[in-house]
Each structure stands twice: as structure tokens, then as C-alpha cells.
Image (cartoon, coloured by chain):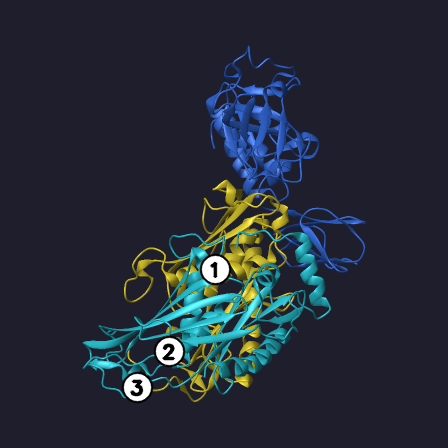
Chain colours: A blue, B yellow, C cyan
Amino acid sequence: MMHVQNRQLVVPGDLIAEGQYRLRDGVFREGNMIYSSVVGLTELREREVRVIPLQGKYMPLRDDVVVGVVVDAYISGWTLDLNSPYTGKLFVSSLLGRKVDLNREDISKYLSMGDVVLVRVEDVDEELNVMLGAGEPGLGRINEGKLMDISPMKVPRVLGKKGSMLNVLEGTTGCRLTVGQNGRVVISGKDQRMVNAAVEALLMIEREAHTSGLTDRVRLMLEKTKIGGS
Amino acid sequence: MDKPEKLMVDGKRLDGRAPEELRPLKIVAGILERADGSAYVEMGNNKVFAAVYGPREMHPRHDAKPDMAVLRCRYSMAPFSVDDRKRPGPDRRSMEISKVTREALAPVLFPELYPRSVVDVFIEILQADAGTRTAGINAASVALADAGIPMKDLVASVAVGKVEGTIVLDLTKVEDQYGTTDMPMAIIPRKKVITLLQMDGHLTGEEFSRAIDLAFQGCQKIYEAQRQALKEKYEVRRED
Amino acid sequence: MAEIVAKVKRDYIVSLAQQDKRTDGRALDQIRQASIKKGLIQTANGSARVKLGKTHVLVGVKLGKGEPFPDTPNSGILMVNSELLPMASPTFESGPPREESVELSRVVDRGIRESETIALDKLAIKSGEEVWTVFIDMDVLDHDGNLIDAAALAAMAALLNVKPPEDEAWTLPEFPIVQRPVAVTVAKINGKLLVDPDLEEEQVMDARLTLITKEDGSLCAMQKGGIGYFTQEEVAQAYSLAKEKAVELRKLLG
């Protein structure tokens, strides 16, 4: 039995449902009762309940593609900051997709401190030790563009249903956006003004993620900027 | 301030309140920009900020727990927050309050969700008028929820005292100074259990029981205000 | 407490508690073997040593002269301090006071101060200029749990042991003690309430509640500790227990 409506704003401790439902994120069970653990919007399905958090940190999940920043280096690899309470480890063999003879090669030529790298989360253990990989095409060091952080909770909104929002962003600005699941976005484009417009658009999405009609408003805002007004 | 002749006149307290009445309460969620979560609380003349950073990596690493998050709390009073300037820096009172504040909030968290990390709670009292630790806990709870840290419930807190034989709710500075008893309490409202309980002064068994009842009532009202504050932060934006 | 309790030990203590039993064979409402010895330290005005099970605390009381606080010109001053000596436990290190030490000092202080145990208003030497200061310094020598009760008891015994100083500024016939508050700590383990927790019980408990009562059973100070919680019924139960046990401990003060 549900105690709330769908897409209702709830806070920690609010009673969501009673009975046998499958629990996803943002909820917990005490006996037969299911409560919200976060400030968020309810998402209720026939057999499962969830509260989509409106705020929170990125928790590394296997198979996520994320944008990391090199913060430490050692003999066989690097530590990447993932905009998360947890850093990830990238071994040089996982970056290159091949075995490396550490006696022969000095790996510092591949990555150095501060480099921005697009990686995939290969494995996360119970202590949240994160192993990263970049051996597939499309991944690896990102050499240019503007890096910005948005709330990881808003990433689905930045992508949109079937990529609809991302299409608007890239289509109208002419920029290329690399969006990591961890809320890190790299915007690259020749026109600095349009890069800035993309930044504005992302901030707007972050602020208004939980409202409706957002995709159209973003398109409108970007087209205005393109024409020269704002 | 000199001791007033009477603290209760015709069943009303010096500030006009009835014994079971709370002081005016204001709570704003998400008031700071950099912190992961924050809140501002006014309880009577108390003005309090709380900020939360975390979960984040714990330094020094060896203080981290391999299978759960560590909660750290720092309660601090600004030098200008009290009548006689307080020397900056932690003193013994602040250390004790930091400890009991942490112990009041810890029971509602899910530490196993964030191994090896730390959640830092900072409470700053900018203006003090008795009950600062309770205002701090009320602010910290809202700040934790604002940061998106999963919680079993919010924690609500209020102090009860005894003034000229009457048990009263939410003491002012004068009542705390010249009354006989000060009993701060914090609860998990949904479960009706007590996570902070301290007392100094004098209470008979019966008075003790009445004091706890009154504290529960006060905490429930504060809880409603905390929930409202969190909803308000997001509801305003939904009105598009 | 940085020591990690082996899960097997934790489970053992918890399951015993479910059967109303404890590892040392005590009943849930039983205090450990307690002893008080007074007057061991000649350089102090008063002193006492308490052994509560294996927990061992020594308290010295010294009287000094000082300036009164501006708003209480005729009142003596009470200062309570504690040291968790490194010898007392592998987890105590030298250094600035940890929060446990601060809490210990402040709770014992409140027990004595709020109950008005010492007639501080009799301790003025010259109004507004000089008053007697009572320094209570508590040294924890061995930590096997429940430092608060042991230290509070030792502090009370040391106060009762104070002989007035040989000083012409001292004009009272004796040291003015008018009340004997006693602290009793109740720990909660899996819903059961246990009096006077030992170290292992403290490491495993959900929370503890210390209640300090006067001779007439009224409450003068209270402190909840630990990251668990209490229901209202448990608090009432703990108060009942504390009142009863305080009477037992008070008899030891002599």
C-alpha cells in the first residue's frame, strides 16, 4: 500500500509505503514500513519504490563512464579524483589495454598530474576500492575543453530521455559535450561564446532539473544566445 | 544582567510565553554555497549556522574505518556571540557539546553506506540566547538532509527547565541563569526515542517525568518546522 | 575508543545480556566490588582512591586562594579537572585533553556544583577580592569501564577527607560539605539495562545514561553518552535503578 503520490517531494523519515515492494535507492525498510532516507521525489512503480535524491555525491558504480582527474602517480599507474568521496585506480595496463614492461617504460609520458581522463569503472569492491580502465576506443586522456562539475544527481536530466536534452545542447551550441556519470562535463567547441552558453545551460538544468518543460526552455535560451541577444 | 524580581507573573513568563510555548523559530535549508549541505536556524534570539561536508575522504587515513563512515562534529561559538566576549578557539564546554551533538545525530545515519569516509558537521553560534546546543542540533539535522546524506529521520532538539517551580519549555538566557534547572534533549521524532539527554539543577522524580513529556512535545513542533524548511527549498522552484 | 571489539566477543556479551547475565557473573542491576580509601596523599588537603572492579581512580583536593568571579564576589570557586593517564589504557596517549576527559570533568563538576555539595558562599576571604578555590583533580590510573561513577565517588570521598588548611585566612571550623551526590551509570545493550558497565560492556553498548542523585533521591545532573538512544520508559527505569544503587554507594563514603 502506497502512502504517497508519484513524483511527490519527500524528506527523510517520510512514510512511503507499507508491504512487500522492491526497494531501490533513497528508501529503507523498518519492519513492514518503507521510509524515505533522503530529500527527493518519489518514483513509484507497481512492484518497486524509490526516492530520487535531489542532492548527493557520486558513488562509483561498475560500468559507469566517468571523467577523472589525475591526482597521484606511482610506478604502475595513477590515482584519479572522481568527484566522489572515493578515488579510483588506473593501472597503466588498463589505460593502454596492453601489458607494459615497467622496467623499460616510464609511464609518466602517458599521464601526468592534473590530466583529465575519460574512464570506465571496471570494478568496485565492498570497501569502495575502485578500479578504472580506459582500454576501449573513445576513452583516455581529454586534451582540451572546459571542465565543469554539476551535481551527479542531475546527469540523467542533462542527457534527457533518449538523449533528447544532450541533442539540444550539442545541436544548438555546436559544441561537443562529454558527460561523465560522476557529474563532470567537458565542453569543447571553437566558439568561446557558445562554450559559455553551454555552461549557462548546464547550470540552468542543474537548478531546474525537477521542473517540466525544461528541454524547451533550454533550447530557447541557447537560441537567443546564438542570435546575439540573451 | 541583574536577577529579575520574578520570572513568572500570572502564569506567563517574562517574554510573555506560556510554560509550554516555544520561542519564535525560523529554519532555512541550503543557505550556504560551498558546503554540501547547510542550514540557518533562529530559536528566539539564537542565530546558528550549520554546514555539512561529506561524505568525503578521511584524513588522516588511519583514523578512517574500513567498513563505515566516521561522523565528526564541531560546535563553536563566535567571540561576539555572547555578552562578555568569548576568546576564540575550542574550550572544554565546546568540546563536550561537540561530543554530545555527534552522539545525538549518529543514530539516524547509515554509516555502512560510505566506508572509509568522513561526514563533517560544523556548527557556528553567531548569537547566543540559551539552548545553543539544541539550536545547533536542529540546524545540523537539516544540513545533513540538505547534503543528501541518507538519514532514518531528522533529529529535533529543545531544552526544558524549571522556573519558580514550573516546568517550562525552551529556556531563555535569563531563565537558564536564574531558574533552577536546564535539561536539553534531542529525539528521533518518528521513533520517539531520545538521543541527547543532559541535565543540571534540581528535579524530583515527578518533575523529571513532566519535563521529558514537555520536551517531547516541543521537539515534535520543531520537527514539523525542519521538514517544512527542507520542502520549501525545493518547492519554490517547482512553481514554474 | 580506538580498540576494535572482536565480533565474537560482542555477540557473546549481547547474548548473555539477553539472558539477564553478564561475563563476570553479575546481575544486571549489580555494581562491581567497590572500595574507597581516604587520606593517601599528604600533599593534598584531601584525597581518596576508589576501586570499582578493576577501574582505579585517585582524586586529590587542594585549596588555594584566588580572585572571585565578578558576578559572585562572595563565593568560593570550584574547579574540576581530570587526567586519563596513559598508563590507564593502551588507547590513552599523552597530549591535550580528549573529549572523554573533558566530559568526565564536566559531568563530575556538575554533580558537585548543582547539588551545592560545597557551601561555596562560606568560602569568601575578603569580599570581591579573595576567595578560596577548591581544585578537584582526578587521575585515572586504570580503565576498566565506568570512569564517571568511579571518579565522582572518589571526588566525593576526597571532599569528605579535606582537612582545613593551616592558614590564618581559614576561619571555618571545618570544610563545609552539606550534601553527598552519587553518580550511577546505566548502560543499554540490546534493550537491556545494565548498571556499572565494565570496559567490554562499554565498548559493546548502544548508549549509557549517567544519573547523579542527592540524598533525597532528587536528580541534580544527568548525561547521556554513546551513539544509541533511549526510550522514555528506559529513562524512567534507569532513574529508578540509579536512585537505588546510589544509596548503596553512598554507604561506602563513610
**Which is more toward the observer, A21 or C250?**
C250
Q: Secondary structure at mark 1?
A: helix
Give residue A35's quadrant in the image: bottom right
Badge 3 and badge 2 both on one subunit: yes
Give residue C59's quadrant in the image: bottom left
Badge 3 and badge 1 both on one subunit: no
Find disc 3 in the rendering and name its residue.
C174
**Which is more toward the observer, A207 or B94?**
B94
Q: Secondary structure at mark 3?
A: loop
**Which is more toward the observer, A230 or B68?**
B68
Find disc 2 in the rendering and name its residue.
C159
Find disc 1 in the rendering and name its residue.
B99
Measuring from the top left, give residue A193's x and y in whole percent.
47, 25
Whether residue C122 is situated above or below residue C71 in the rendered picture: below
Residue C162 shown left or right of residue C21 in the figure:
left
Q: Residue at x 28, y 78 (%)?
A: C76
Is there CB contact under 8 Å for labels 3 and 1? no
Query: Label 2 is placed on what type of residue?
Result: Leu
Q: Residues within 10 Å of mark 2 (few under 14, many from 20)?
A: many
User: Which quadrant is the C terminus of chain C positioned in?
Assistant: bottom left
Query: Label 1 is placed on what type of residue?
Result: Lys
Q: Secondary structure at mark 2?
A: helix
Residue that extends furthest to the top in the rendered view of this protein: A104
Q: Residues within 10 Å of mark 1 (few under 14, many from 20)?
A: many
Measuring from the top left, give residue B165's x and y in whole percent.
45, 87
Residue C76 shown left or right of residue A43 in the figure:
left
Q: How far apart are labels 2 and 1 at the CA level?
A: 29 Å
